[in-house]
Amino acid sequence: MNSKTEFSIGNVRIGGNAPVVVQSMTNTDTMDVAATVAQCHRMMQNGAEMIRITVPSLKEVEPLRQIKERLRAEGIQTPIVADVHFNPKVAEAVASVVEKVRINPGNYVDKRNFSHLDLNDTEYAAAVERMAMRAAPLLEQCRKHDTAIRIGINHGSLCDRIVSRYGNTPNAMVQSALEWIDICERYDFHKVVISMKSSNVLTMMEATILLHEEMEKRGCTYPLHLGVTEAGSGLEGRVKSAAGIGALLLMHVGDTIRVSLTEPPEQETPFAHTLLRAVQQTRPEDADVQDDTLVFSSDDTDFDLWMAKAATLAGYAYFKHRIRDIRLENPHFPETEIRNLEAVILQACRIRMTKTDFVSCPSCGRTQYDIQSVLTKVKERFSGYPGLKIGVMGCIVNGPGEMADADFGIVGASNGLVCVYKGKQRLTGAVTVDEALDQLAQLVGEWSL
Ligand code: SF4
């Protein structure tokens, strides 16, 4: 393979010199074929060039096939990506259905129970070998059907084996990715995309750059998918995404992107395209750093474009120069709006925390409660606590792990009910949203004493 790997996923070129591809993910129940097809339509109308759909179990494989067939029957060729966690059999089954399968090495064979595993080198190598054996049938299916794989590393769901050896660090994320790259290469499989996601913008950037450098040393740069997980909603979610994704793109790293928002997925892609425009109109030299402060003057009249440029430059300047402050100037926006954007960017980069930090997933077909309205209520009630971190997550399968460093959290259970967490500890069974909010109020009250 050459140093800039490029290939097709369905009708879309990815990697190498191909344009950056904008992705999004449905949050309908995959069993509901009509609703998922309708949501795909809305996402594509808003600029989604690749669509991911969750496949929690084998029973969603046939509906997924129907969703794809309906879209193709309508002449829509947008590549479909299956999102698989925990179950290798599901990954093997969907490899013949879709153009790309996303797996999470943190839960494909290994597990995360927040336990320390004291493995010696022989035991460690044996665990990696077990994973390689389990990956073989998937890679065989992918080769047979010309299906790509995304090795989707999540900082919040690294397995115990990796965390025990490398810590919960960007390097641990890189080691997890390299294990799977080695396995793919051992089986001569190269249609590989990799993502290094975290809700922490700096961690996501560091892990991605480390992996990029490691792949360059090895002489094979697989395409990278960029995203900040659990970025939340509104201005905060967009700024977090722009700071991480935009900064990496400014460094010419990244081939596909997803702006994850706890909003309807069709609202993700317009901002993703704005971010791409912002990066095209920005150069690293625009990061004017004076005495640890990023100074950015602009006369952009489009708020989102300006905000995306400012966050991109801030992410870049923080990564490169560890800036401590930001000063924005723009004659077209009121002073209060400018100062608020500065504060939101500083918070997104974790340079200065002036209010509660919210982490919330975009939701997917696993979510069985109205996460968007619950996040809105949580933000309204608990915003004024600098240093506090609250998670609002869609499902109990992945949510607790992904928000493990939050102080408190609400996590979706089934049938509209949720559970309340304190750190990694579940405090309640499945309760109503109102009961959960009351419990959260009590916890936040005690925290703030
Ligand atoms: S945490 Fe959210 S996005 Fe992740 S699998 Fe669960 S519901 Fe889906």
Image: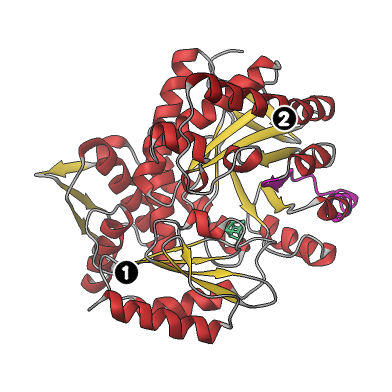
233 horizontally vs 448: left or right: right
Which image quadrant for residue 423? bottom left
Which residue is label 1 attached to? 356
Which of the marked residues, 2 or 1, is nearer the chain's N terminus? 2
Q: Are marks 2 and 1 in contact (CB under 8 Å)?
A: no
The vertical placement of 373 against 271, above or below, is below
Residue 389 at x, y percent in the picture: 35, 65
**What secondary structure is found at the residue carrying circle 1?**
loop
Q: Residue at x 53, y 30 (%)?
A: 177
Q: Is residue 87 magenta?
A: no
Which image quadrant for residue 441? bottom left
Splitting the image into four quadrants, where does ligand 1 fall?
bottom right
Magenta residues span 63-86
Q: Quadrant of the C terminus?
A: bottom left
Q: Residue at x 71, y 17 (%)?
A: 187
36 horizontally vs 418: left or right: right
Instruction: Give the colour scheme shown.
Output: secondary structure
Residue 316 at x, y percent in the picture: 31, 41
Does the beta carbon at disc 1 come under 8 Å from ligand 1? no
Which image quadrant for residue 288? top left
361 horizontally vs 348: left or right: right
Residue 173 at x, y percent in the picture: 46, 35
Which residue is label 2 attached to? 134
Residue 347 at x, y percent in the picture: 29, 59
C-alpha span from label 2 to label 1: 42 Å
Q: Is residue 286 visible?
A: yes
Q: Amino acid at mark 1?
A: Thr
Q: Pick whichever, 391 or 283, lies toward us.
A: 391
Q: Residue at x 39, y 61 (%)?
A: 406
Q: Amino acid at mark 2?
A: Arg
